[in-house]
Amino acid sequence: MKIGVAGAGAMGTGIAQVAAMAGHTVVIYDPYETSLGRSKGILDGDFAKLVSKGKLDEAKGKSVRNAISHTSNLDGLKGCGMVIEAAVEMMEVKKKLFADLESVVDEDCILATNTSSLPVIAIAAACKHRSRVIGIHFFNPAAIMPLVEIIPAFTTEESVYQNSRALIDSWGKVTVKAKDTPGFIVNRIARPYYGEAIKIYEEGIASFADIDQAMRSIGGFRMGPFELMDMIGNDINFSVTETVWRQMFYDPRYRPSITQQRLSEAGLYGKKSGRGYYDYSVSAVKPEPTADDRKLHYIFNRILCMLINEAVDALYLGIASRDDIETAMTKGVNYPKGLLRWCDELGAANVLDTINRMHADYLDDRYRPSLLLKKSAAEHSRFF
Ligand SMILES: NC(=O)c1ccc[n+]([C@@H]2O[C@H](COP(=O)([O-])OP(=O)(O)OC[C@H]3O[C@@H](n4cnc5c(N)ncnc54)[C@H](O)[C@@H]3O)[C@@H](O)[C@H]2O)c1
């Protein structure tokens, strides 16, 4: 099957590589020649690396690379069985692109969007045949990250969902099904990892280094929240937070922070700009954590309980199944353990107690326990 990718940026290029490695002929469309040129260069480099590392033999490397072509002409996507859109994150651009795509592809071509934060159904609304539109959300870098969220919209036909999931599974990815709601699974449930960490810092309880240390040393997370935000980019992380919050009708649980907004406004994006929460210049010395054990446990417990509450609430609201929630957080953001299992280990009553105490202290709906967490605590039930 011929696969189309619309948008030759970081994600489109990575997705094309995954599809070609799985044996497809791939056409990447982008209206901008500079984007196409960059994408070609990245693919040449990536395939050369795969060959030099012995992951592909030379002939295979050449044939897979040659299976990917680039075009600035939308007609190049004619005959595709699926087109995955990975253009800039702007609703108007995506809507126009989907409407234009429909005039080029066959009626049975699946049209997928890789959007991180826009409603799939709103993009589908631009199409005559909405039932063929679905969300297929890869993680960055697409060639390496195993997780893909499959997001059927309210209008997506069941067979389109089934065929899409089976296809992406066949590419060796781990798929999960998510409801078409803000942030889908990962970008919704992970919000407190950043938000609660910043709040702890803003309250003067601990430094970035202390909070990072708590999550790494006690929780076993690979990166602390501030290290991770600096890696993702404070501009991108802030924008995802703000979008999720706005789309949740300003639910205080997802409220962004002034601290991160200021960093983003100042261009202190993190690693890519040389400075974020930490300084990445050559001469910089990384600050050492100074918090004692008691404080580290307080920080870890507060952030973890907020994450668990989010995961439990996502289950309660049917955003995804129990198993898909666990898979999404361990494969999409490398959490050391699924949050629902973690809830079982701590005991729902203890998690609820932490959230209730914060609610009493702050009188803020941000610390609002999920109904399912309350129920689990009352019934002493477990998720597994
Ligand atoms: N970067 C991430 O971490 C990440 C992760 C998952 C999903 N996404 C989503 O993937 C999409 C692309 O993100 P990215 O990081 O690759 O962005 P990017 O800026 O690297 O690439 C965007 C590309 O879109 C192209 N483009 C602009 N207008 C277009 C049009 N009308 N038709 C086709 N292409 C057009 C640009 O030339 C550019 O090549 C976005 O929807 C984003 O939300 C990004």
Image (tube, rainbow, N blue to C red):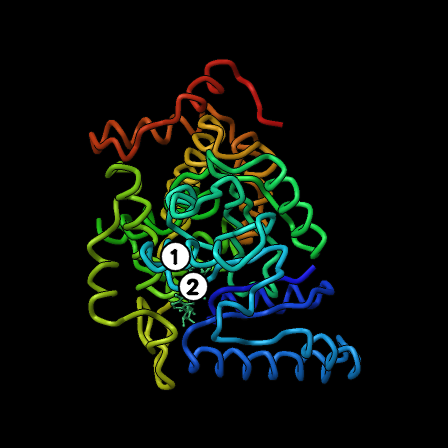
Q: Residues within 10 Å of mark 1 (few under 14, many from 20)?
A: many
Ligand 1 position by quadrant: bottom left
Q: Position of residue 115 (x, y in %)?
A: 43, 54
Considering the numbered disc 1 on the image, is that residue within a helix, a strand or a loop? helix
Identify the residue shown where x is 57% and y is 49%. Answer: 107
* Image quadrant occupied by the C terminus: top right
| Distance from the alpha carbon under mark 1 to that under mark 2 | 7 Å
Q: Is residue 38 above or below residue 175?
A: below
Residue 290 visible: no
Residue sticking out furthest to the top: 379
Look at the picture and state if 185 lies above or below 357: below
Q: What residue does disc 2 label? A: 87
Q: Is residue 312 left or right of residue 4?
A: left
Q: Report if the beta carbon of the residue with label 1 is closer than 8 angstroms to ligand 1.
A: yes
Asked whether, in this view, residue 169 is left or right of residue 293, the answer is right
Q: Report how many numbered discs are placed on residues in the image.
A: 2
- Secondary structure under tag 2 reads loop
Mark toward the start of the polypeptide (1 vs 2): 2
Relative vertical location of residue 70 with respect to residue 162 in this rendering, above or below: below
| Badge 2 amino acid | Ala
Quadrant of the rendered structure where residue 212 is?
bottom left
The residue positioned 45% from the left and 52% from the top of the image is 215
Q: Residues within 10 Å of mark 2 (few under 14, many from 20)?
A: many
Contact? badges 1 and 2 (CB < 8 Å): yes
Find residue 157 and report its horizontal and vertical position in percent.
Answer: 56, 36
Q: Which residue is mark 1?
A: 94
Please report the residue visible at 47 percent of the width from the left and 75 percent of the height from the top.
72
Mark 2 Cβ and ligand 1 under 8 Å apart = yes
